[in-house]
Image (cartoon, grey):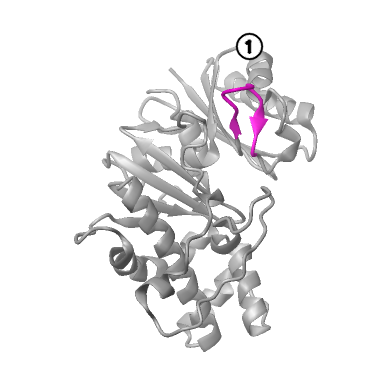
């Protein structure tokens, strides 16, 4: 049966239809109605109906979305698209589509597509990292997204950032970190250190120079000392964060996505730094860049339904 995936983002809604072999049959993107709850539901319904009309067949629909549904209330929570929070979003969308709907956090959908057809295909346990404007994580076990008992499986971006890896390795550098408040109400969340904007902000505060992360990475490769230190600190912070995942979940593969995943130094330096911090004498887990890029989430949403 045809499967449709919807990836709901803050600026765009992407729809893809795939067949049983995960081949793309139809694809489209539309703008997300800003600040409009009912408008968002109508935009999703419209793109699904257009897809089915053009392909001439009904489909099962999977949704990748920011935040998650509270098991206690059935209401949306923790979404940076705040218009959804406190509303029965998944139920309302299912009612509008007049069918059962499967939904999961967008980072879980990212991890799912990479586990089934992407960089981690064949791996039993996969941890997926999305580090872009924000930071999220997703867990896949045996080809299924793991939402968890409380619906927050993989919400790694809103755990407190541990002590800098430089302290723990005894390196001779000033690795002190100022606590940063997070929009979620906590202080010191990983998102405030590992996201692209966070790295850019920290670089500007330390050097007085304002660059994008891509520019900082290019400057570091060209030998700029300030940029090289910023990238080194990013690698350290990512390493100590992933070492905790290894100690708790011990995944078969780690996949990185989002804009931060384009920093080439991560793949060259992370394995040794994670190995030095993880509670093991043998670290062989591959750390790979996502194969599906920014479309991992929409494919994973469709894969919430079995082929």
Identity of the residue drawn at 33% across and 35% down: 141
What quarter of the picture does the C terminus occupy?
top left
Can you say whether 38 is above or below 241 in the image?
A: above
Mark 1 falls on what kind of element?
A: loop
Q: Position of residue 172 (x, y in %)?
A: 42, 85
What residue is shown with label 1? 98
How many numbered marks appear?
1
Residue that sits furthest to the left in the current view: 282
Can you say whether 152 is above or below 60 in the image?
A: below
Q: Position of residue 244 (x, y in %)?
A: 38, 54
Q: Is residue 199 left or right of residue 268?
A: right
Does the segment drawn in magenta span residue 70?
yes
Q: Is residue 196 left or right of residue 291?
A: right
Q: Is 280 or 125 nearer to us in this picture?
A: 280
What quarter of the picture does the N terminus occupy?
top left
Q: Is 18 or 198 nearer to us in this picture?
A: 198
Q: Position of residue 194 (x, y in %)?
A: 54, 61
Q: Position of residue 275 (x, y in %)?
A: 28, 64
- Our reading of the magenta stretch's main secondary structure is loop
Can you say whether 160 is above or below 10 in the image?
A: below
Q: Quadrant of residue 45?
A: top right
Give the residues drawn in magenta, as a range.
Answer: 68-78
Mark 1 nearby-residue class (10 Å; few <14, some 14–19, many ≥20): few
Identity of the residue drawn at 47% across and 32% down: 147
Does the segment drawn in magenta span residue 139?
no
């Amino acid at each position: 049966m045809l499967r449709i995936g919807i990836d709901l983002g803050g600026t765009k809604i992407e729809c893809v239809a795939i067949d049983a072999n995960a081949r793309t049959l139809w694809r489209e993107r539309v703008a997300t109605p800003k600040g409009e709850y009912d408008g968002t539901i109508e935009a999703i319904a419209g793109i699904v109906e257009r897809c089915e009309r053009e392909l001439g067949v009904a489909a099962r629909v999977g949704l990748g979305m920011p935040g998650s549904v509270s098991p206690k209330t059935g209401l949306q929570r923790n979404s940076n698209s705040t218009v959804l929070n406190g509303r029965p979003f998944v139920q309302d969308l299912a009612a509008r589509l007049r069918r059962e709907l499967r939904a999961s956090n967008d980072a879980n959908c990212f991890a799912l597509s990479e586990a089934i057809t992407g960089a981690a295909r064949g791996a039993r346990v996969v941890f997926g990292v999305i580090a872009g404007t924000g930071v999220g994580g997703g867990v896949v076990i045996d080809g299924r997204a793991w939402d968890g008992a409380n619906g927050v499986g993989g919400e790694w971006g809103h755990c407190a950032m541990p002590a800098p890896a430089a302290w723990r390795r005894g390196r001779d550098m000033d690795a002190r970190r100022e606590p940063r408040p997070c929009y979620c109400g906590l202080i010191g969340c990983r998102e405030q250190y590992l996201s692209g904007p966070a790295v850019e902000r920290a670089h500007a505060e330390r050097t007085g120079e304002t660059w994008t992360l891509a520019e900082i990475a290019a400057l570091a490769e060209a030998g700029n000392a300030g940029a090289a230190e910023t990238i080194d600190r990013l690698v350290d912070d990512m390493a100590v964060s992933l070492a905790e995942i290894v100690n708790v979940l011990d995944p078969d593969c780690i996949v990185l996505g989002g804009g931060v995943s384009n920093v080439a130094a991560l793949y060259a330096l992370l394995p040794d730094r994670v190995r030095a911090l993880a509670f093991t004498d043998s670290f062989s887990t591959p750390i790979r860049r996502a194969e599906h890029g920014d479309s991992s989430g929409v494919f994973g949403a469709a894969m919430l339904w079995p082929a």
